[in-house]
Amino acid sequence: MYYAGVLEYKTSHEAPRRLGELEELRYTLLSVRCEDGQCIANFPNGEFIFPLEMRDELAGMVGQEIACLRLDGKIHVRRVDDA
């Protein structure tokens, strides 16, 4: 049954998560969306939560391989260039 305006329940495995301190993520960024005042980025290994102010930066990197590192409470993002 579908109820209008009710969010679908996600298991803890499917729910977006935050990067832990010193955790690095390196995958192709598939999509970016805003939900509940947060930026949610979709990668092949799942969804991750980023600060809302990073939305524009991440949106410009959709379709590219990027690396994200959380260091001292800040998230650092860059495009990966293996050349």
Image (cartoon, grey):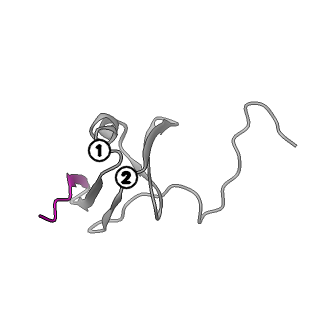
Find residue 22 and report its horizontal and vertical position in percent: 26, 68
Between 82 and 73, the one lying in front of the other is 82
Between 47 and 50, the one lying in front of the other is 47
Seen as rendered, the residue at the extreme left is: 83
Q: Earlier in the sequence, mark 2 or mark 1?
A: 2
Q: Which mark is residue 61?
A: 1
Q: Which mark is residue 29?
A: 2
| Amino acid bearing label 2 | Leu
Q: Secondary structure at mark 2?
A: loop
Find residue 44 and report its horizontal and vertical position in percent: 46, 61
User: For the magenta stretch, what is the residue range?
Assistant: 74-83
Find residue 52 and report its horizontal and vertical position in percent: 37, 37
Q: CA distance from mark 2 to mark 1?
A: 7 Å
Find residue 61 and report its horizontal and vertical position in percent: 29, 44
Q: Give the prevailing secondary structure in the magenta stretch.
A: strand
Between 72 and 63, the one lying in front of the other is 63
